[in-house]
Amino acid sequence: EPPLLADSELSWRQGYLFLQRTFSLHTAHLRKDMENFFQLVKNIVPALTEKKHKGQDGRIGIVGGCQEYTGAPYFAAMSALKAGADLSYVFCAREAAPVIKSYSPELIVHPVLDSPNAVQEVKKWLPRLHALVVGPGLGRDDLLLKNVKGILEASKARDIPIVIDADGLWLIAQEPALIQGYQKAILTPNHMEFSRLWEAVVSSPVDSSDDHASVLRLSQALGNVTVVQKGEHDLISDGQQVVRCSQEGSSRRCGGQGDLLSGSLGLMAHWALLAGLEKTNGTSPLLVAAWGACSLTRQCNHQAFQKYGRSTTTTDMIAEIGAAFSKLFET
Ligand SMILES: NC(=O)C1=CN([C@@H]2O[C@H](COP(=O)(O)OP(=O)(O)OC[C@H]3O[C@@H](n4cnc5c(N)ncnc54)[C@H](OP(=O)(O)O)[C@@H]3O)[C@@H](O)[C@H]2O)[C@@H](O)CC1
Ligand SMILES: Nc1ncnc2c1ncn2[C@@H]1O[C@H](COP(=O)(O)OP(=O)(O)OP(=O)(O)O)[C@@H](O)[C@H]1O
Ligand SMILES: [Mg+2]
């Protein structure tokens, strides 16, 4: 028998199974009717009202930014803001901070990632953060990665939703136990990153003829963390089902599109978990969030390409977030 909703001890997973059964949703049905997912994303988007204070609609932290890469954390942090977050924080290496600040006055930048007490410095902010995006422009320096491990452990202890992208995925491929089984994790691998993760956690070779099965298997091997396999179509799995996002984008593949995705996903993950299973009709909130962020990224790509064609860059795509969001999700 399914557990009763009245039970105050109801765990997240029990609730998921209960509502999933109650609403009788299953993969085939969802796949056939993408309109459902548009509606589910609309359901989790918080209403714009005059009654809220600054911060209520999202305070998102990006962990990344080093000497080599300053664009990626900027793109991720700006994308969270432009999608509707109230505050966006970047935790980066000292040298990257003035550069990132100079791109934008909107971002709050903490030059702490390479300091000896990096974990403590970030820990101070965790109680204020609704979600963390780990990896854009992080690089692969051992000291930074060691600090990021500590930040991941501290964030898990606080049950904070964590999106892992780019070099964050490099770290997870070295040490999958860092994220294994954490139910509020979402991984966003591109083609290369997916292969690395696969090799780290699945013993058999990847079956390139069946992407659905592969993403499902990777999610399961990581203890049902949500996995977004980016590509011509985005495939998203929570280890139980696979959903596909095929929103029309363009043929332009400039660097930074993945950063737009991970930044906006950090925000949507927070919104979806806050809205809960009733608003998502029993579908995993993180699946809804991922589908929303993938659609948004692809729609931005589509709109920017209509204007700029071959010269489209991620900055052009970020400028489209407002219009793309309205077109897709505003009623
Ligand atoms: N402006 C900035 O600051 C930006 C900074 N960024 C930051 O850079 C850091 C490293 O991230 P990353 O993605 O470049 O690293 P990695 O995983 O080694 O992949 C590199 C290689 O994988 C391959 N490859 C990729 N796709 C493939 C496919 N579909 N099919 C086949 N192969 C494929 C391809 O190999 P190639 O074609 O060169 O042989 C590619 O060169 C990270 O911190 C990130 O955030 C970026 O966010 C961009 C904007
Ligand atoms: N062939 C494709 N056709 C359409 N959209 C694509 C294609 N490949 C990727 N995308 C979209 O671009 C976005 C970023 O995916 P991509 O694979 O470029 O990430 P990435 O390599 O991590 O990017 P970044 O340069 O930011 O690191 C995703 O939303 C994905 O849906
Ligand atoms: Mg990337």
Image (cartoon, rainbow, N blue to C red):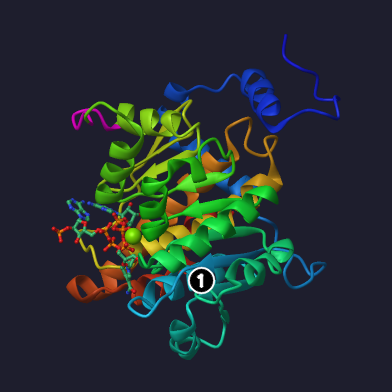
Quadrant of the snapshot with the N terminus: top right
The answer to whether residue 315 of the structure is visible from this angle is: yes
Name the residue furthest front. 116
Name the residue rendered at 51%, 36% in the picture. 36
Residue 207 is covered by the magenta coloring:
yes
Query: Would residue 110 appear left or right of 305 to someone viewing this image?
Result: right
Name the residue rendered at 37%, 68% in the picture. 141
Query: x and y percent of residue 13 in the render?
Result: 66, 28
Q: Quadrant of residue 208?
A: top left
The answer to whether residue 159 of the structure is visible from this angle is: no
Q: Quadrant of residue 256?
A: bottom left
> Which one is in front, 13 or 264?
13
> Which one is in front, 109 or 275?
109
Mark 1 residue type = Ala
Where does the magenta region start and end?
A: 206-211
Quadrant of the snapshot with the C terminus: bottom right
Query: x and y percent of residue 179 in the render?
Result: 51, 43
Give the residue pinned by disc 1: 77
Residue 257 is covered by the magenta coloring:
no
